[in-house]
C-alpha cells in the first residue's frame, strides 16, 4: 500500500530528551556529553563527531537538538546544510559548527565546510556533522572526507516498528491523546514512517481533533486529509 509522505517539519523544536534513542543510545549519550563540553569547558576538544544513517533515523533531529541546547546556554552556532547556497565565513564567536546533509554538498559548500573545519581546529571549536553515508563512501573532496572520519563516528539505526509505536504512544500520552491500536496501524501503514513526519502528523491530528471536538479515529484522519 502506498504511503503518504508529509513534506512538513516538526512544529516544536527537537531536543535531546525527545529523541527516542532505541539502538542509538551510544550516539545520544555522546552528544549529551558533547553539548556539556561545548558549553562548560574553557578549552574544547577539536575532535569532530560525525553521525550517519539512512533518511529518517534522526540525524537532523540530533544536530538541531544540540544546536538548540547550545543556544539556550548562550552559545552561537554555525550551521550549514544543503539548502545554504552561500555559506557564511567562519565566525570566531561560534561555540561550535554543525554540518548537516554533507552527502549533498556542492563544491561551494564543501569549500566552506573545509574552511570551517580548519578554523574550528585552530580556535578549538566543536564540530558536529551528519550524512547518509559513512565517511569513506562520501563523494566529497578528500581533505573534507578524511576530516569527517577521523573523530567520533556513529552509525544511526532506524527504529523497529515496535519502537516507532512506542515513540507514538509516548508522544500521544504526553499530549493526553488516546491512540487505539487500529489508529496506530492505520498511521504506520499509510504515512511516512520517519519520526519527524510521524510527530508532525500527531501534532496535526491533535489540533484537528480539538477544532472538531472529536477523538482521534480513522474517520477523523481521513476527514483531516480531505480538508487540509
Image: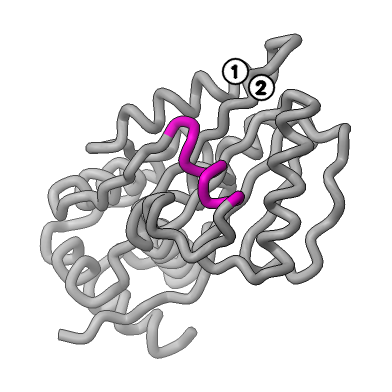
Compared to residue 188, the image places residue 135 above or below, namely above
Q: Is residue 4 magenta?
A: no
Q: Mark 1 to mark 2: distance in Å?
A: 6 Å
Q: In the image as oriented, which residue stretches furthest toward the bottom? A: 226
Instruction: Identify which residue is drawn at 48% across, 35% down.
Output: 150
Q: In the image as oriented, which residue stretches furthest toward the front? A: 142
The residue nearer to you, when weighing 30 against 213, is: 30
Q: How many marks?
A: 2
Residue 216, position in %: x, y? 29, 64
SS at badge 1: helix
Residue segment shown in magenta: 143-152
Q: Crowding near pointer 1: few (<14 within 10 Å), some, many (20+)?
A: some
SS at badge 2: helix
Residue 15, position in %: x, y? 52, 38
According to the picture, the residue beneath numbered tag 2 turns out to be 38
Q: Crowding near pointer 2: few (<14 within 10 Å), some, many (20+)?
A: many
Residue 179, position in %: x, y? 23, 55
Could you tell me if the residues under marks 1 and 2 are in contact, i.e. CB atoms within 8 Å?
yes
**Quadrant of image for the N terminus:** bottom left
Amino acid at each position: 500500500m502506498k504511503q503518504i509522505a508529509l513534506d512538513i517539519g516538526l512544529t516544536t523544536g527537537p531536543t535531546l530528551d525527545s529523541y527516542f534513542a532505541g539502538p542509538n543510545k551510544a550516539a545520544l549519550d555522546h552528544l549529551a556529553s558533547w553539548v556539556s563540553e561545548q558549553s562548560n569547558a574553557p578549552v574544547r576538544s577539536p575532535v569532530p563527531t560525525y553521525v550517519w544513517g539512512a533518511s529518517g533515523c534522526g540525524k537532523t533531529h540530533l544536530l538541531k537538538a544540540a544546536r538548540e541546547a547550545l543556544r539556550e546556554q548562550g552559545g552561537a552556532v554555525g550551521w550549514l546544510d544543503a539548502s545554504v547556497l552561500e555559506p557564511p565565513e567562519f565566525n570566531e564567536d561560534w561555540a561550535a559548527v554543525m554540518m548537516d546533509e554533507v552527502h549533498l554538498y556542492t563544491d561551494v559548500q564543501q569549500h566552506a565546510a573545509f574552511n570551517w573545519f580548519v578554523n574550528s581546529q585552530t580556535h578549538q571549536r566543536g564540530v558536529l556533522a551528519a550524512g547518509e553515508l559513512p565517511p569513506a563512501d562520501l563523494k566529497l573532496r578528500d581533505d573534507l572526507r578524511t576530516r569527517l572520519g577521523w573523530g567520533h563516528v556513529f552509525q544511526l539505526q532506524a527504529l523497529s516498528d515496535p519502537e516507532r509505536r512506542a515513540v507514538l504512544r509516548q508522544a500521544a500520552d504526553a499530549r493526553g491523546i488516546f491512540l487505539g491500536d487500529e489508529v496506530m496501524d492505520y498511521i504506520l501503514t499509510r504515512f511516512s514512517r520517519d519520526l519527524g513526519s510521524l510527530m508532525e502528523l500527531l501534532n496535526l491530528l491533535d489540533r484537528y481533533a480539538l477544532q472538531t471536538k472529536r477523538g482521534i479515529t480513522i474517520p477523523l484522519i481521513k476527514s483531516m486529509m480531505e480538508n487540509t
